[in-house]
Image (cartoon, rainbow, N blue to C red):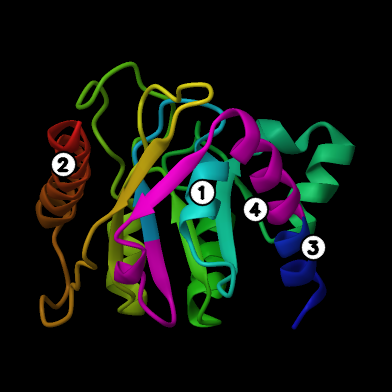
Amino acid sequence: MDFKFILYRILRAVVMFFYGLVKPFRVIGKQNIPEGAAVICANHTSLGDPFYMAFAVPKRYHLCLMAKQELFKFKPLGWILRGIGTFPVDRSAAADVNAMKSALKVLKSGKKLGIFPEGTRTAEDGSVSPKSGAVKLAEKTHAPLVPMYIPRKKRYFHVNTIVVGEPISLEGLGKLSHEALERISDELMDKIAQLGQTVKARG
């Protein structure tokens, strides 16, 4: 077990304890997270979403997150983020080559990669077109895409439900065109929104 994974598990446990006190949660579909490399994709509405994503992934797996580079400018925070395997992405660039290389390294090592395809926090479902980076990474590494819904409103002292959907495999599709990448990215976000509807249906 490497140092980054140890630090990740410690930080995850500490934050999970406090969240459990004020914003408790439950996870539906945790069994859908496969062994080996996977691209975990969720909707993004609040600063706490990366924590909820980490809570939903079993602790035996190392989830490495892609985060905006602005977070790394504060050196103590940057040290912690890098220490647990999180790496920066330049959202202003059309394609951040260094971020893509880091993401490929994570997946090729068999770890879980966490991405918010919308690239930013959103006010409502479908208000921002998703970026195709997650689908590109799945295509290149043959890792499945795992949709995850994180509730938009996290209520204090009420159980917040996170839903993990079934993995989406791109095996057999070959080289994807730009149009196909965009289409699959849209379908992925639609699937995530559908997972949210199951939460509402349950009440």
Which of the marked residues, 4 or 2, is nearer the chain's N terminus? 4
Identify the element where label 3 is drawn.
Answer: helix
Region of the chain picked out in magenta, as a range? 11-39
Residue linked to disc 3: 7
Residue linked to disc 4: 87
Residue 198 is labelled as 2
183 on left or right of 126: left
Residue linked to disc 1: 96
Give the residue type that dot 3 points to. Answer: Leu
Q: Are marks 3 and 4 in contact (CB under 8 Å)?
A: no
Check the image and report above or below for 142 versus 154. below
Whether residue 16 is in magenta: the answer is yes
Please name the residue shown 58% across and 60% down the image. 64
Task: Please identify the residue farthest to the right as the structure is shown.
Answer: 76
Please name the residue shown 50% across and 81% down the image. 110
Q: Nearer the viewer, residue 32 or 24?
A: 24
160 on left or right of 63: left
Check the image and report above or below for 187 versus 4. above
Residue 165: x %, y % from top left: 23, 58
Which of the marked residues, 3 or 2, is nearer the chain's N terminus? 3
**Disc 1 crowd, CA 10 A, few/some/many (<14, 14-19, 20+):** some
Q: Are marks 3 and 1 in contact (CB under 8 Å)?
A: no
Identify the element where label 2 is drawn.
Answer: helix
